[in-house]
Amino acid sequence: MKEEKPMGEWEYLNKLSEESLELNGIQLAAVYCGACHLKPGPELLDKKTWETTVLPEMRRRLGLVIAEDFGHDVGEDTNAPPGIYSTKKLISRENWDKIQTYYLDAAPEKLPTIESKLDSEGPIPGFSLIFPQYKNKRPNLTTLTRWDGISNQLIIGDRFRRLYTVEGKTLEIMDSLSISSPASDIRFRENGTFDLLTMGVMDPSNFAIGKWLAYSAFDMQVEEIKMDSLRRPVHFSFSDLNQNGKEDVVVCNFGHHIGNLSWYENTDAGFIQHVLNTEPGARKTIIADFNLDGLPDIAVLMTQAKEGIYAYINQGNGNFKQEVWLNFHPVFGGSDFEMADMNADGYLDIVLVNGDNADYSPILKPYHGLRIFLNDGQNRFEEKMFYPMHGASGLLVADFDQNGGLDIAVLSYFPDPSKSPKQNFLYFKNHGLMDFSVHALENQRNNSWLTIEKGDVDQDGSLDIILGSFDFKSQRAYPMENWMPFAILKNQGMN
């Protein structure tokens, strides 16, 4: 018996549009919203945001364009490729009005506020904040901060298509390199060579002009294009996935309306693309043997529409089986994750931050923050900790104070502007058994942190924290201020 192929989203919705649906607003929302992602509850956004941005965008994607859309970009006018906005009306005005009424009647006027639960608002225990002193005038638009423990140098990249090397102990700029587009990821090799991933276009875009470049030295004359035409790639990771003795690469082609997660098989004829996930929004991958069968598996954070943590379990010979470890609603705003054994039971747990707030609903959300999901030993994960933090965007997990417990550092690119001190960096000090005290960073000037990294910058045997500054207002400042692309939280080595 021939197995029927599951219907795609548009095929399913097109079939629905041809049927007479005697459903109420709740039922219609479950059918239409649930066709493309988890159905979001009305309580997730305030009434104004639903009414003015999110619901109109959904309606236009369903092909229902009405008089109030005059003056708004629709379909190809948004630079979306065909298939994102339906050219056929997939829902009647009557049924759409039922969905809209359901959301607007049930949505709150305002979302709940979150209260700070800080244990201190002074210096981070065991750390001192250091700013580099550079005299040149340049906007602070850092896209990459990465510590090279082989050469003991900090590598920073910025929006202006430059890459810099910084000497660890003195923080002196040692060299710079012109690159084709903003850097998003880098991999250092033992012999001093490195691989670089460039985005192509940093802002939301469907253009496929990102590149993977290999450098035999810090010199643009010795770059080798390993791969081009990548769709806004933001992360790569490496492993011999099919066990043929050659190193393969996994690339998060984040994209915008379209994108994918792919692994590229290293063959004698070049790299062959194998798409693992056809959705945009792949943010970061971690490669490890999650089921302990001796083969490298892939975990990925997906952050657009069908948000969640997906795993691709290696079946051998280059074949993978998808597992959905965690599934989130489409306004969750997943931003970063790590896998670490947080409760010392021998299993990798998931530490995750959600706080992306740059799309259709840029309001403060009480469900943004830091989460820890514990592994039951069968790669089933249950949330055991949530700490609310507006706009949580990046994190580090490490035993910074060397007391045997894993600490967590979290930055926010979209903090609550009314908070003082500015809560765009929080340090979670682990006192044992996931008993955390929470500390905010003071006296940090007025920086906006976008990237975060760890490394023994001053080579004293303890891990420091590096924060990359990305601040559009520094581009418009007059007079322009001294360049301050990063700051360092120097670890004093105290428990």
Image: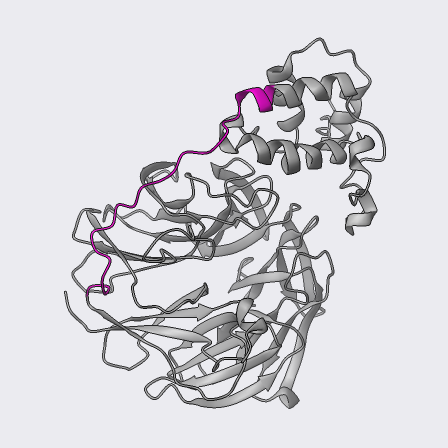
Q: How many marks?
A: 0
Left or right position of 256 against 429: right
Per the image, is 107 magenta? yes
Outermost residue toward the top?
22
* Quadrant containing the C terminus in the rendered view: bottom left
In the rendered image, the vertical position of residue 171 relative to residue 463, given as above or below:
below
Q: Nearer the viewer, residue 13 or 139?
A: 139
In the rendered image, the vertical position of residue 124 relative to residue 63, given as above or below:
below
Left or right position of 304 against 443: right
In the figure, residue 397 lies in which quadrant? bottom left
- The answer to whether residue 210 shows anywhere in this view is yes
In the figure, residue 457 lies in which quadrant? bottom left
Q: Position of residue 67 (x, y in %)?
A: 82, 31
Q: What residue appears at the point 38 percent right and 74 percent down from the top-left corner?
A: 487
Left or right position of 169 against 119: right
Outermost residue toward the right?
87
- The answer to whether residue 217 shows anywhere in this view is no
Per the image, is 421 magenta? no
In the figure, residue 251 lies in which quadrant? bottom right
Magenta region: 102-125
